[in-house]
Amino acid sequence: MTLKISILPVYSELYTGPDQEIGSIHLLKHQVETLAAFNDPNIDVIFNVAMTGDGKSLAAYLPAFQQQKSIIAMYPTNELVQDQYRAFPNYEQDLQISLPRYGTMYSDRITSLMRQHDSAVRLEEVRKLLEKNRILLTNPDLIHLMMSHQYGWDHYRKELPVTIGAYFDYFLFDEFHVFGVPQVISVMNMLGYLKVNYHDKPADRKKFVFLSATPSKLMNDLLERGGLRYKKIEGKYRSTEQPGYHRILQPCELNLHEVSQEAPTETWIEEHLEELLAFFKLHPESKAAILVYSVATARRLYIQLKAYFAPHGITVGENTGLTHRDDRRASFEKHILVGTSTVDIGVDFRINYLIFEAYSAGSFLQRFGRLGRHSGFPIYRAHALLPRFVLERLTLKLGTFEEVERETFNAAVREAFPVEAEFKSYTQRWGVVQAAQVLAELQGQSKKDANEAFSIALSDQYNLFYGTEIQPAMPKALKKYWAFRYKQPEVLAELSSFRGLSPLSCGVWDTDNHLQTYDLFFLLANTEFEILSPAEFMQEVKRQELEERDYKDQLLYLKIIKYVPERQQLILGLQFVVADFAAGLHNVQVLDTFIVREPSFTWRDQVNRALKTKNLTCILSDMGRKELKQRLNLPTMFPIQRIQDKTGAEYAVAFGQEALLLDSLIFWRKTKGDQAMFL
């Protein structure tokens, strides 16, 4: 089943008032509106939801570029941090300006600075980056740790949030739509913290800009409850050329195809390699990207395509979480890039041919948005690989159209995919405890009057977010926090992190000879490996002159022999009878003694010995994995594993931050004997 559509170009409205040009750039209307909202004292939070390729980044940086405001800009991947950093010389040239000092802050960068300065104190390098850069590009994970008093020790924990507030005027969150409810809560806690800190200093009150992020109902509600004033700014578009509009997206040919478990993405691509080769022969200056979800799928495709296209002089690059950073960077220069979410989130690269799979509306629009951003190619073509029911819905909606406007098509995509779970109960069940963590850290520090007054004021702010006048939320949340801290600190550790922890992270010596860390469950399902001793692995770390701290305290150290051609079935085991502890079903708990039952492999005993030592935050359900996902509208890629207890009875299990999310959906559901869950 296939649907072919011609997507019309997109033209964005130009600004036609005074100061409409900066250097060689004519400003767009939404960019000027963003700057105006920033200058409005009655607006705290700005959402710019302009279309892909419409200059949202420039809109966000205008206060820094034109008004010398200092900014912390946060991106979901370090690749995107580096991509934006490399764009700044172009801004200087195009805008004909000289930027203030700018820099990046993430783990590898901090390590590099420590080596340059022969420094043994990591926090000192962080402090220098905060104090010396007027424009600082980083990730939200690091800022979250600092603002929630979790980064460093002693006085650093309370000094870093003060430093951030003192040196920066506003905060940018780019591609924020890729994050879920736990991250929204973490950011709202940060916004509340800064609001309280500058309540009596209106001239220094901080601003917050979110890009590519239509505010969710949850975020709208929390902003309104917390007294933070926001504005949403949209672009205005046309599909035909006319005065006052500038083309931002090229027209393209879109082909929608069905894929399934029986005929997956990998098979479809293998069957259409000749078509891709013919396209390159007809249009030799072309650049292509193939975007999939699975790192293992990307690795297999990369190996196969490299062998297939090499005789024709067509180069292939890989860009995944397992790809070395040098190879990731080089992949953008290849004729064909095979990648995962490491490239489809925001990184700007020139392509005119795109193959991608998508299991959600957001992912579809994100990936399709990579195509048509750059002029200069004679043709733009995309192949989207979709579940049958989504393709059927799009065919019903658009099948009679030969040409479709991009906004109309985007709306149809949002309607065609199922609505995913919103995890509404997470805020009251777990989000409020995230806020309590910040208060607990403050209360554990100095008891000086100023600190105590701030703690009380912050508690009042968080009560606005999460409680009511009649029933404040924070006293109960603090009790829950301390209960977890003493009895189940593993749950609290997951809750207090930004994206969750990686308790099953392993040191990996990959087939390309590069070293990295990756999740055990992925490795079990997709690779054949041998286990190395920590000493063997760390010796190679030293030989490659890598930072030893990045590879310490891993669950295991593995050397990958090969990637298997098909994903292996993973079944975990528990060494007790779950039915004897049925009251624990559907609630977050901490368990140990996990083992791997399948697949069977040479090193399974060694893996199980290591796995049984870990206390893991998890949730068990007597519903099957597939049924859980369908009934609860969980995202397709939501990680749920099969698990069997001592008797062989089968359950579903989720770990880490996903366990907390799943708990918010099923904590109230009960089982009755051996019967299925009541729904």
Image (tube, rainbow, N blue to C red):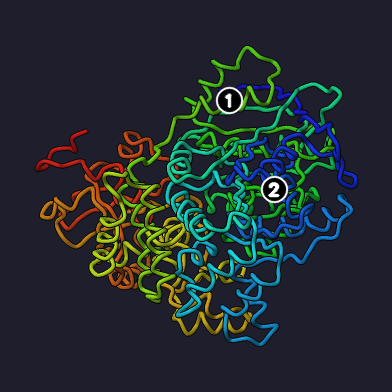
Residue 620 in the image, given as x and y percentages of width and height: 25, 51
Which amino acid does the dot numbered 2 rest on? Ala
Residue ID at (76%, 59%)? 86
Residue at image mark 1: 411
Residue 335 in the image, given as x and y percentages of width and height: 77, 48
Q: Secondary structure at mark 2?
A: helix
Q: Quadrant of the N terminus?
A: top right
Q: Quadrant of the C terminus?
A: top left
Task: Name the residue nearer the viewer: 363 or 441.
Answer: 441
- In the picture shown, does residue 515 fall above or below 246? below
Residue at image mark 2: 60
Marks 1/2: CA distance?
A: 25 Å
Task: Name the residue nearer the viewer: 355 or 195.
Answer: 195
* Position of residue 37 in the picture relative to residue 141 (left or right): right
Residue 397 in the image, given as x and y percentages of width and height: 56, 16
* Position of residue 422 in the picture relative to residue 169 (left or right): left
Residue 570, by quadrant, is bottom left
* Position of residue 179 in the picture relative to residue 459 (left or right): right
Residue ID at (80%, 33%)? 15
Residue furthest toward the top? 400
